[in-house]
């Protein structure tokens, strides 16, 4: 026990002396956090919907770059060969190394949370569940880091292996690119990557349902971590002269690949390929049920029906319109973009935009009897492509704006848009407009609502001559 604690202490001291390990463990995740904060700075609660991704990047940096870099560097310098001379079993040394790395990634994760809270994020909804998820994620990626440390013969090889794991995880593994933005084939591929389950589990602890919504993800992470730790222990080598290509027992790598394949196959079998959406986040309009018609009764005289109550938008005043927050992203930005009038789409985009323009006047959701919901639905035609970053996202807002101005009188449209901007989270959400020829599902209704709000503000500014910045 004393030997394990002493090695744990030594590992931590060596870590904080290794500049490259500090770079991957602390600075690299913070760079991602700042980038996400700038990219999604217009969200109501900064970074809340992205902490699963950011914490996953933090663990990836510390476990799949920092851990193997430190281990291989120490092995090249003969540090591990000296450990072998101590009267401590191999498993004690490996276990204390894993515990030291867990402490390191935990402090990196806490640092990210602290910075996120400092810029306005609310506290996680399920702190205990988040801690459980973080531990499972750390276990999975530390196991992977051990395997990488045993595969690499030198530090440059660690960098190459790390990129081979890190980049696919970011792009099609659901870590940096939202799964809703990926084509269907990539969703199937992502089911075989632990990054997807890491993001799902961590996000369930930050803003999701908690432990009840992460059981499959936890199972997948524990299975992948156990396979990685087992293979890493079996392939363990003390000396830099022990080249991987000349070692026996390389078949233990099959255990790692088998675990990844088993998790992906199980996800396919259980139908967990689609983008997960928390049902509690979807706000739907109440369905009106007509009461049964009463039996005909004789009336002494016909009574005229009472006049209908005024629509909610009719109560909007000029003060309400002037009091809106017109601080919105610029039209040329990546959030709620609107192409200038002289920027026309070309090639397949031109045909796609023209098809939406043709179908929009007869689109059933845009012809709702409730004017507020009808305008909301039309705003979603601009919001969905923006939420999933489709190439047509810059051009469809103009199509929607033109249709709205043709359909509604100017004063009425301004008031309806103002009501929507003042009540952005009401009404039914449409996050799939494939019936208009735009393929892709946003996945998160809150993002679509947010984009609809931003476009409502921008359209009001255009109609009233106000400046939106």
Image (spheres, rainbow, N blue to C red):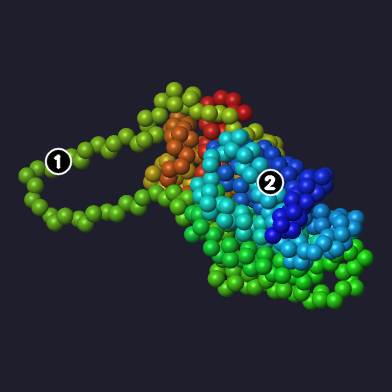
Mark 1 lies on a secondary structure that is: loop
Looking at the image, tell me whether mark 1 or mark 2 is earlier in sequence order.
Answer: 2
Q: Position of residue 71 (x, y in %)?
A: 82, 57
The reply to whether discs 1 and 2 touch (Cβ–Cβ < 8 Å) is: no
Residue at x-position 72% and y-position 70%? 230
Q: CA distance from mark 1 to mark 2?
A: 73 Å
Q: Position of residue 94 (x, y in %)?
A: 75, 62
Q: Could you tell me if residue 222 is visible in this image?
A: yes
Residue at far left of view: 300
Q: Position of residue 322 (x, y in %)?
A: 49, 24
Q: Which mark is residue 303?
A: 1
Q: Is residue 270 above or below residue 365?
A: below
Frontmost residue, 461 versus 1 = 1
Q: Could you tell me if residue 168 is visible in this image?
A: no
Nearer to us of marks 1 and 2 is: 2
Q: Quadrant of the C terminus?
A: top right
Q: Position of residue 227 (x, y in %)?
A: 69, 69
Taking 98 as reference, is 270 left or right? left
According to the picture, the residue beneath numbered tag 2 turns out to be 108
Q: Which mark is residue 38?
A: none
Taking 460 as reference, is 93 left or right? right
Mark 2 lies on a secondary structure that is: helix
């Amino acid at each position: 026990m004393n030997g394990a604690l002493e090695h744990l202490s030594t590992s931590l001291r060596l870590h904080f002396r290794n500049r490259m390990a500090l770079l991957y463990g602390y600075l690299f995740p913070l760079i991602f956090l700042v980038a996400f904060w700038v990219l999604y700075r217009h969200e109501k609660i900064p970074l809340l919907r992205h902490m699963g991704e950011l914490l996953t990047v933090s663990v990836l940096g510390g476990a799949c770059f920092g851990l193997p870099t430190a281990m291989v560097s120490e092995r090249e310098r003969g540090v591990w060969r000296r450990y072998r001379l101590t009267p401590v079993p191999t498993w004690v040394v490996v276990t204390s190394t894993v515990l030291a790395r867990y402490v390191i990634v935990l402090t990196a994760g806490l640092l990210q949370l602290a910075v996120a809270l400092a810029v306005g994020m609310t506290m996680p909804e399920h702190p205990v569940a988040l801690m459980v998820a973080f531990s499972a994620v750390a276990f999975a990626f530390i196991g992977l880091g051990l395997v990488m440390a045993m595969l690499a013969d030198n530090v440059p090889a660690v960098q190459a292996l790390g990129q081979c794991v890190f980049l696919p995880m970011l792009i099609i593994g659901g870590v940096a690119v939202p799964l809703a933005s990926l084509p269907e084939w990539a969703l199937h591929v992502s089911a075989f990557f632990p990054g997807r389950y890491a993001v799902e589990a961590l996000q369930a602890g930050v803003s999701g349902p908690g432990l009840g919504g992460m059981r499959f993800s936890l199972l997948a992470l524990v299975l992948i971590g156990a396979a990685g730790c087992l293979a890493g222990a079996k392939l363990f080598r003390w000396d830099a002269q022990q080249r991987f290509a000349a070692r026996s027992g390389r078949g233990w790598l099959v255990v790692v690949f088998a675990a990844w394949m088993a998790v992906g196959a199980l996800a396919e079998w259980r139908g967990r390929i689609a983008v997960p959406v928390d049902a509690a986040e979807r706000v739907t309009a109440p369905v009106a049920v007509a009461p049964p018609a009463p039996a005909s009764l004789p009336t002494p005289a016909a009574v005229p029906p009472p006049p209908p109550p005024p629509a909610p938008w009719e109560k909007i005043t000029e003060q309400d319109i002037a009091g809106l927050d017109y601080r919105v992203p610029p039209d040329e930005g990546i959030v709620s973009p609107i192409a200038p009038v002289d920027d026309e789409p070309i090639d397949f985009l031109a045909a796609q935009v023209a098809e939406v323009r043709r179908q929009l006047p007869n689109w059933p959701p845009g012809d709702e009897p409730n004017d507020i919901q009808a305008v909301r639905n039309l705003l979603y035609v601009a919001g969905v492509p923006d939420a999933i970053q489709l190439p047509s996202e810059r051009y469809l807002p103009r199509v929607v704006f033109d249709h709205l101005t043709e359909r509604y009188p100017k004063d009425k449209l301004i008031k309806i848009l103002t009501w929507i901007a003042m009540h952005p989270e009401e009404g039914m959400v449409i996050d799939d407009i494939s019936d208009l020829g735009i393929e892709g599902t946003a996945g998160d209704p809150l993002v679509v609502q947010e984009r609809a709000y931003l476009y409502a503000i921008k359209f009001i500014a255009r109609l009233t001559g106000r400046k939106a910045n």
